[in-house]
Amino acid sequence: MRFLLVAAAALVAMITPTWASDYPWKPTKPITIIVPWGAGGATDQVTRVTAGIIEQELGQKVVVVNQPGASGSIGGISASKAPRDGYTWLAGAPKQFGTYKLLGLWDTWIDDWQLYVTVTNVPLVSVNPDTEYQTMDQLLEAMKTKLISVATAGAGSSGHSAIEGLKAVVGFDYRHVTYDGGNPAVIATVSGETEVTTQLASEQAEMVRAGRLRPLAVLASQALAIEGFGDVPPITDFVKEPLPVLSTAFGIYIPKEGTPAEVIATFEMIWNEVIPNSPELKAYALEKGALFAPSSGQTARDRVWPEIQGDAWSFQAAGRAVISPEELGIPKP
């Protein structure tokens, strides 16, 4: 398998019309990508794959730095305050640029950032195998009568959005246990520290394959195929009321204001010509149960907007919003 991926990468390199010397921006020192979550989570995983591709294209080292805390806002603020010379990027889920202000975490907005999306992930409801819950129906019934612990990567994270979206439709309460990243949240459920996690499938896939998590439902309208495990049923098999959009796009971003035009142009070229043909990202998506859907600019924003709407109004319904989504121009979906 590794040989095939290397061979495919070599083939893409031969047919790709753009070379490092053809890009308008030629970095002269290492580029830093700040991952505002812990190592091993969905953001960290796909960013490291993407960093390798950028490094190969630009012929310059790309360093991934984990800087978790405050639901990703600490690393985000650090990236926004760095010199806007193209050498410091931010990784994560762009939908959070639409809810940070809503949650009172950071005064930023999606239109402040140039977006480069790689994959879209979906949340998975999984339980520790030692729990009594064998099906999603059993878990939902239990959650209506008792306080069950749910591990997520913190307020505003994909896992938090997922459980809040489900709560808004089904009607239950839960004990929210937060961690600095999706991987620690998943490990907490594996160890029995919590009973449930609603983090992304990409963060859970390895533990599902190993039998250390029992997946009960994917929060989507179609079953999710996890390589080496099989199909996980969709939440629509158990809940008939429509749920908000709970998918999460991931990528890397840079502030629009102050960033040199040649930097933006270079990454537009990479996202148009190289990223869509990347065998490494395609393999990652297949292994992790993610959708490979690269996009940038306005196209990326349009794809992410329904995610922002779903999260914003779920947080509003949960009483976590410090201002109304309407004040930010986010209409109810």
Image: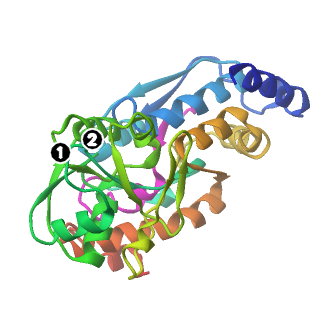
State whether residue 95 is above or below residue 281: below
Quadrant location, the N terminus? top right
**Which disc, if any, is residue 329?**
none
The secondary element bearing badge 2 is classed as helix
Between residue 132 and residue 269, name the one nearer to us.
132
State whether residue 298 is above or below residue 180: below
Examine the image and state in which quarter residue 68 appears.
top left
Residue labelled with disc 2? 185
Coordinates of residue 123 in the picture (x, y in percent): 41, 55
Coordinates of residue 138 in the picture (x, y in percent): 25, 65
Q: Which stretch is magenta?
A: 85-106
State whether residue 292 is above or below residue 239: above
Instruction: State whether residue 38 appears in this view.
Output: yes
Check residue 84 for magenta coloring: no
Estimate how packed mark 1 is, as few (under 14), some (14 to 19) or many (20 or more) residues with alpha carbons within 10 Å: many
Coordinates of residue 217 in the picture (x, y in percent): 40, 60
Estimate how packed mark 2 is, as few (under 14), some (14 to 19) or many (20 or more) residues with alpha carbons within 10 Å: many
Query: In this rendering, would 67 be left or right of 295?
Result: left
The secondary element bearing badge 1 is classed as loop
Tell me the residue at 83%/27% (across/down). 13
How far is the residue under mark 1 from the one under mark 2? Answer: 9 Å
Identify the amino acid type marked 1. Answer: Thr
Examine the image and state in which quarter residue 6 appears.
top right
Check residue 98 for magenta coloring: yes
State whether residue 149 is above or below residue 205: below
Identify the amino acid type marked 2. Answer: Ala
Tell me the residue at 36%/66% (across/down). 311
Quadrant location, the C terminus? bottom left
Between residue 99 and residue 179, name the one nearer to us.
179
Check whether the beta carbons of the residues at disc 1 and disc 2 lie within 8 A of each other. yes
Residue labelled with disc 1? 194
